[in-house]
Amino acid sequence: MPADTSKALVVLSGGQDSTTCLYWAIENFGRANVDTVTFDYGQRHRIELECAGRVAEFAGVTSRVLPIDTFKALGGDALTDDAIEVAQEIDADSGLPNTFVPGRNLVFLTFAAALAWRGGIANLVTGVAQTDYSGYPDCRESTIASLQETLRLGMDFDVRIHTPLMHLSKKETVELARDLGGLQAMALTHTCYNGARPPCGECPACELRARGFTEAGIEDPLLASS
Ligand SMILES: [Zn+2]
């Protein structure tokens, strides 16, 4: 199946990392060649979906929301299950935070690849990073390389998964957003695991975001606007 190597589809969550990836894609492929997709996977914080829409509109690219209800039906993690609070500590049994949604990125990228296949788009862009504090195994470079190979085989499609943040620290991600002209859009993004806006400032996601901006010596536009 031939695909257009000049086109890219960005998996946009409405957060800081995927927004940075959107600006990376615009820089590398041109605004007119970039589309975004956002997954409604039953996340507790519906604000993420609104933020993704606002970011795409602000950046001048198309947006589309696709539903995936199975993670919520499975439950057991703090991002989809209302009964589970976000824990500050790593779970002793799994060695992972309770915000880990098993298989989430695998499923997102598989559906994104299906959408790209339909649209003849050869490039997928995702904000996963193996430097991420949380150590989610589906954010690792080896996982993404293996998934890319599986998608190529399974869809007979020369898809390429780009991970511009894979080896960057949070500080470097903030600097990249600045260099790509994406800082203003950060005011529209959502990071807080508690779904608070203005952000709670205390959850692991807020702390990580704050550290990145502080180390980069840049004021977070989200805090400046709220
Ligand atoms: Zn927070």
Image (spheres, rainbow, N blue to C red):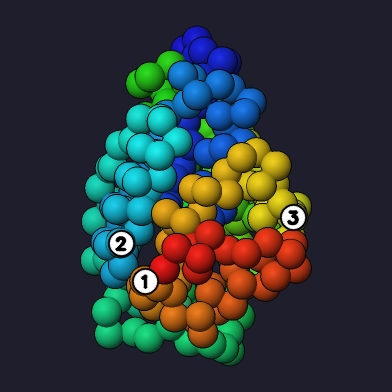
Residue 99 horizontal side relative to residue 82, left or right: right
As displayed, is residue 168 above or below residue 61? Answer: below
**Count of numbered circles on the image:** 3
As displayed, is residue 56 above or below residue 156? Answer: below
Indicate which disc, 1 or 2, sits on the residue closer to the N terminus. 2
As displayed, is residue 166 above or below residue 223? Answer: above
The quadrant in which residue 182 appears is top right
Q: What amino acid is at disc 2?
A: Ile
Quadrant location, the C terminus: bottom left
Indicate which disc, 3 or 2, sits on the residue closer to the N terminus. 2
* Tags 1 and 2 touching, CB below 8 Å: yes
Q: Mark 1 points at which residue?
A: 197
Q: Which of 100 and 1 is in front in this view?
A: 100
Callout 3: SS: helix
Callout 1: SS: loop
Q: What amino acid is at disc 1?
A: Arg
Q: Name the residue under label 2.
A: 47
- Which label number is shown at residue 172? 3
Callout 2: SS: helix
Q: Can residue 112 be seen in this view?
A: no
* Tags 1 and 3 touching, CB below 8 Å: no
* Residue at 36% over, 53% down: 51
In the displayed image of the protein, which residue is found farthest to the top?
2
The quadrant in which residue 193 appears is bottom left
Residue 175 position within the rendered picture, expressed as x and y whole percent measured from the top left: 72, 52
* Residue at 45% over, 63% down: 225
